[in-house]
Image (tube, rainbow, N blue to C red):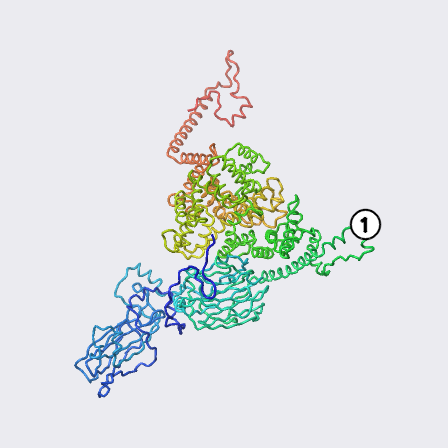
């Protein structure tokens, strides 16, 4: 359902929007305040002025200090005495208590009034002291009254422990006046501002103010505790500085490729933090003073009525001031919102240049607008126009958001945006504006590219025109037969049409001429535009065919020229191929500048993969692209809005995006083709009437899933067979939807409704939602539609939640008057959480604009949601599927090519798959890629939201060991392992434990990240125990795993260490030592006893006793040195 936008045009078109609230007359302080501001005032809290009561009137700031004005009524002008009042201030500065001598004369009973009022840069005429007294007796006599005027401490003293926020005042006025009783001003109960109107004499003087940091400290007569006094003394003499804040905002710092569609960059201004700047901005709500400066490169003028350049959308989704558009004639359309609630627009007299970089400067100064265009590096003025109005413009740059380019309200320009600066509070002459064209080389390359492409398109156009007009003559020149020979001999000689190209042009474009000659001449379309694009497509197909060969990457030298010419013909799939080749150095010299050029060209041509590539690079801030979430959102949202439309388009190179990882062997086994085992088995079961097989088979054919080619006609046959032969509600519903929409079959609304009701009666929530869709779309019965959608939403259907949100957004929900964007946003958010694509898109938009209170502005979240939808695009799925098929078939060149193309769009599953291929075939990656493949794509993947744990583990290993040119980084390695552990991977806990075993220290923030309290686990032993336990708990293996073995070994070491350090150890050691000493003593005793019992040498031995032999043999004696315990009569050991 298309959304309607704010009114656009001249005058303002409301388009069923509620009228904006009436705006009051212009404020008195229209012009900017003059004079400086005390440096101590900026950034002070507004609560410091709460002690003042109310505003009075703006005092005169004259320099006369003794001025008397007589205002005697006419009836009393003949009297001899005239009332007067003078006063003398003994101290000219503002003090806590200032003595003032008041001299006055009253001709009648009177009341004397004395008042002190102050003014700052934010408030004026605030009374801080009041005193009045009567004089009824001393008439016609000069009287003197001494008054002690007491000023608030925050005006007199510096900040201290008690006075936390002193204020800076610019003017202090002391004024006095006299009123007579009979005039009505003598009543003591009358307010002073009313009393002043009846004054018969008045006077004032100015007191000199003292800046806050030149004032003395106040003696509070209080003794602080020593610690409080010391802490205060540390900051007592420090002068706070306001945070520097400028009114210059850089809305765009890098080139933006605008495709001319309904997407653009969303920017939002916050209020100034500096109170002086914010006060100035607020004063100029009805008197705008600002300057816009931006660079543009236009390819065409607007094809519609208006195309967006830069415009403001207020909180009511209506155009505001300023709104700048491009017309179909090339003029600028500048639109302003008036204070009285209407709109006013003007069109410039001059037109903007085409295919030339120029700077557009627009300055507003009240009702005067100055428009200037400057061309070239020297910014030579091209056109200048001044436009003046008498109306008051309403301008509040914080009450909405700015859009650069297109939006859901208006399409953008076709071309490129350069740097864009916005001066919020200043009107500048073009010579005073500092907004150079950054990225000059890239901007120059864009200009050269389109100059070359103009030649290529002209050559192709002349070629096709020549072929179409002279096809028969060309055949006569090429074919040879007897009839033609006779014709040439006796008839008029035939002439071959010559192509009007010079040799220099042929030398500049040799590949183009060669490709044109090799193409079939009679297959050229009749339309000139179609012919150029068609030839570009055929060149691209020829290049892809060469790349798909077994040695396809060897053909790069002949492929690149074909792709360049194809890109120039407007076929921007070739532009994306070239961008990836140059960015990654895929068998070509790596050239970041050329990569950026072709990526921007492809994005300008609305090539889906190019736009996703640009969005991803700006989202991550990689490859020399600046980090810019708003710019990333502009690219991603363009593709995200096309994704649901692409999914319902049966034509084109599309496939269902499947998250298939090359590491998962189980998923790879079920990939099939039409002649594969899995497909044939499903077909067999479906033929037998298996409803689940029929539904799965139909889905595979309808969406092109699981390796099966997309075949909607065959899918519909299985949908019909299952719906009519079985009672499966899902098949009945699917076939009903096909009949409703006429996708591949003739529409049959009657049969579709019957089937939908049948499926709904079986409790299928999708069918209940479908009935609501039927009554909404075809019957316009919103009551019944809401009834069915509410029922389906209760059943958990996200489509129903989205549809209810649409009813609230359109203001047609039964019983609810008007549009309710807040409630619509809640339904969209619920649908998005259920995976609904359109609901996700609306939530992404709300997060980017921040116009709803329930969706606070969050550009990063907006990009994430838009990226999530864009990555479901079928054209990306087609590239991924081709890479997977090539991998399964063993075609490494083709697999590497397509996975590089997919990975550069930023989709995580292709990045990890490409890194896996480079690990499997490092020789292939090293030979053909100019980047460190494994490092680059694993590193890219870990910065994705849904990154797998094995990618974190891999990056942890690469950081730990170092990889090629990357140095070792232990801290980053710990972070990677910790992230894997947080994702529930046991290997992450195991690796962290090993690092601690090796002596590494885990930082406290990593422990907090893992929810390990450092106060409880203060030692490495405690942390190791916790990590090994978590490792075991998260291990998926049923048998003994490394985690369980490590946990067991760790606890054995703990037990052994505990044993060695226990009291039992000391007891056993003492006991064994005692036994050893006793044994040694006994041993020596036995040796001595044996020696004493031996027979003397001279005695004759007993004949019956054999001669005594040594206790051991010589050989045994040698071994006895190692075993001293071996003796003739060994004793048993204790």
The residue at which mark 1 appears reads as 482
User: Whole-percent x and y of residue 293?
Assistant: 51, 66
Q: Quadrant of the C terminus?
A: top left
**SS assignment at label 1:** helix
User: Whole-percent x and y of residue 1096?
Assistant: 49, 19
Check the image and name the residue furthest to the top: 1104
Check the image and name the residue furthest to the right: 489
Most foreground residue, 869 or 697: 697
Image vertical order of residue 965 relative to residue 368, above or below: above
Looking at the image, residue 587 sits to the left or right of residue 436; the answer is right
Image vertical order of residue 289 relative to residue 647, above or below: below
Looking at the image, residue 934 sits to the left or right of residue 1079; the answer is right
User: Whole-percent x and y of residue 921?
Assistant: 61, 42
Most foreground residue, 348 or 374: 348
Most foreground residue, 383 or 552: 383
Looking at the image, residue 540 sits to the left or right of residue 240; the answer is right
Check the image and name the residue furthest to the left: 137
Visible residue check, residue 939: no
């Amino acid at each position: 359902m298309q959304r309607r936008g704010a009114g656009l045009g001249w005058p303002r078109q409301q388009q069923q929007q509620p009228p904006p609230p009436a705006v009051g007359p212009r404020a008195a302080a229209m012009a900017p305040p003059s004079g400086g501001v005390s440096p101590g005032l900026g950034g002070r809290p507004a609560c410091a002025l709460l002690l003042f009561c109310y505003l009075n009137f703006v005092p005169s700031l004259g320099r006369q200090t003794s001025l008397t004005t007589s205002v005697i009524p006419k009836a009393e002008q003949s009297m001899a005495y005239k009332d007067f009042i003078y006063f003398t201030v003994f101290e000219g500065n503002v003090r806590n208590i200032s003595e003032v001598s008041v001299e006055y004369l009253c001709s009648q009973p009177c009341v004397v009034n004395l008042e002190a009022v102050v003014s700052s840069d934010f408030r004026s005429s605030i009374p801080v002291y009041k005193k009045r007294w009567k004089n009824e007796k001393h008439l016609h006599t000069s009287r003197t009254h001494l008054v002690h005027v007491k000023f608030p401490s925050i005006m007199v003293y510096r900040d201290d422990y008690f006075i936390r926020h002193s204020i800076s005042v610019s003017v202090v006025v002391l004024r006095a006046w006299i009123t007579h009783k009979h005039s009505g001003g003598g009543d003591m109960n009358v307010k002073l501002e009313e009393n002043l109107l009846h004054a018969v004499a008045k006077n004032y003087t100015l007191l000199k103010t003292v800046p806050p940091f030149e004032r003395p400290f106040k003696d509070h007569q209080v003794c602080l505790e020593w610690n409080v006094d010391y802490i205060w003394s540390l900051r007592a003499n420090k002068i706070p500085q306001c945070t520097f804040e400028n009114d210059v905002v850089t809305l765009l710092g890098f080139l933006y490729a605008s495709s001319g569609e309904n997407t653009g960059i969303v920017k939002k201004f916050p209020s100034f933090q500096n109170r002086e700047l914010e006060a100035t901005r607020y004063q100029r709500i009805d008197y705008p003073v600002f300057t816009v400066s931006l660079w543009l490169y236009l390819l065409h003028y607007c094809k519609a009525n208006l195309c967006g350049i830069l415009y403001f959308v207020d909180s009511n989704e209506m155009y505001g001031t300023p709104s700048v558009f491009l017309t179909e004639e090339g003029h600028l359309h500048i639109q302003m919102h008036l204070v009285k609630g209407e709109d006013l627009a003007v069109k410039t007299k001059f037109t903007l240049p085409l295919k030339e970089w120029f700077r557009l400067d627009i300055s507003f100064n009240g009702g005067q607008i100055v428009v200037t265009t400057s061309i070239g590096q020297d910014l030579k003025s091209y056109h200048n126009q001044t436009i003046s109005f008498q109306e008051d413009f309403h301008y509040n740059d914080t009450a909405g958001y700015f859009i650069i380019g297109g939006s859901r309200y208006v399409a953008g320009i076709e071309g490129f945006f350069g740097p864009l600066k916005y001066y919020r509070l200043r009107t500048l002459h073009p010579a005073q504006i500092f907004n150079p064209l950054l990225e000059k080389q890239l901007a120059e390359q864009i200009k050269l590219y389109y100059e070359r492409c103009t030649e290529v398109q002209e050559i192709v156009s002349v070629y096709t025109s020549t072929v179409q007009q002279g096809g028969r003559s060309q055949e006569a020149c090429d074919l040879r037969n007897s009839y033609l020979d006779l014709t040439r001999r006796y008839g008029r000689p035939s002439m071959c049409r010559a192509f009007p190209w010079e040799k220099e042009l042929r030398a500049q474009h040799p590949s183009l001429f060669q490709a044109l000659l090799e193409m079939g001449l009679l297959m050229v379309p009749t339309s000139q535009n179609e012919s150029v694009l068609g030839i570009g497509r055929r060149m691209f197909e020829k290049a892809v065919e060469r790349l798909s060969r077994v040695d396809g990457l060897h053909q790069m030298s002949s492929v690149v020229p074909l792709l360049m010419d194809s890109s120039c013909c407007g076929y921007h799939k070739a532009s994306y191929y070239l961008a990836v080749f140059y960015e990654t150095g895929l068998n070509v010299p790596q050239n970041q500048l050329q990569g950026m050029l072709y990526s921007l060209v492809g994005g300008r041509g609305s090539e889906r993969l190019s736009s996703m590539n640009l969005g991803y690079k700006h989202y991550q801030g990689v490859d020399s692209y600046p980090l810019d979430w708003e710019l990333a959102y502009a690219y991603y949202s363009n593709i995200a809005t096309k994704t649901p439309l692409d999914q319902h388009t049966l034509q084109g190179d599309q496939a269902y995006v499947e998250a298939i990882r090359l590491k998962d062997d189980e998923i790879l086994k079920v990939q099939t083709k039409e002649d594969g085992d899995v497909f044939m088995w499903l077909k067999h079961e479906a033929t037998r009437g298996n409803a689940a097989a029929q539904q799965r088979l139909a889905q595979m054919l309808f969406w092109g899933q699981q390796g099966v080619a997309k075949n909607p006609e065959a899918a519909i046959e299985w949908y019909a067979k299952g719906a009519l032969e079985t009672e499966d509600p899902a098949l009945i519903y699917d076939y009903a939807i096909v009949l409703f929409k006429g996708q591949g079959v003739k529409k049959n609304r009657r049969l579709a409704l019957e089937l939908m009701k049948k499926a709904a009666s079986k409790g299928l929530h999708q069918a209940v939602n479908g009935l609501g869709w039927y009554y909404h779309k075809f019957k316009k019965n919103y009551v019944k539609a809401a009834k069915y959608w509410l029922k389906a939403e209760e059943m958990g259907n996200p489509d129903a939640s989205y549809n209810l949100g649409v009813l609230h957004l359109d203001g047609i929900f039964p019983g609810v008057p008007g549009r309710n964007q807040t409630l619509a946003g809640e339904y969209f958010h619920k649908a998005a959480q259920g995976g609904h694509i359109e609901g996700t898109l609306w939530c992404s938009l709300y997060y980017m604009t921040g116009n709803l209170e329930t969706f606070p502005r969050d550009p990063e979240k907006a990009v994430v949601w838009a990226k999530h939808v864009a990555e479901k695009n079928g054209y990306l799925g087609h590239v991924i599927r081709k890479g997977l098929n090539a991998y399964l078939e063993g075609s490494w060149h083709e697999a590497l090519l397509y996975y590089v193309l997919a990975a550069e769009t930023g989709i995580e599953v292709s990045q990890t798959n490409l890194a896996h291929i480079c690990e499997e075939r490092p020789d292939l990656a090293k030979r053909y890629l100019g980047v460190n493949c494994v490092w680059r794509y694993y590193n890219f993947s870990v910065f994705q939201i849904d990154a797998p744990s094995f990618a974190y583990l891999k990056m942890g290993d690469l950081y730990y060991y170092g990889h090629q040119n990357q140095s070792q980084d232990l801290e980053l390695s710990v972070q990677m392992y910790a992230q894997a552990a947080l994702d529930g991977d046991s290997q992450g806990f195991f690796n962290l434990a090993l690092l601690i075993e090796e002596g590494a220290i885990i930082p406290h923030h990593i422990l907090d990240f893992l929810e390990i309290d450092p106060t409880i686990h203060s030692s490495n032993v405690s942390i190791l125990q916790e990590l090994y336990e978590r490792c075991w708990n998260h291990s998926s293996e049923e048998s003994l795993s490394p985690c369980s073995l490590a946990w067991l070994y760790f606890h054995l070491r703990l037990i052994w260490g505990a044993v060695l350090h226990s009291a039992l150890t000391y007891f056993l050691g003492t006991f064994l030592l005692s036994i050893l000493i006793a044994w040694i003593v006994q041993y020596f005793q036995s040796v001595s006893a044996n020696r004493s019992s031996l027979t003397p040498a001279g005695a004759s031995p007993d004949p019956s006793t054999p001669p005594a032999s040594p206790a051991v043999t010589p050989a045994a004696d040698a071994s006895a040195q190692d075993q001293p315990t071996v003796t003739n009569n060994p004793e048993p050991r204790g």
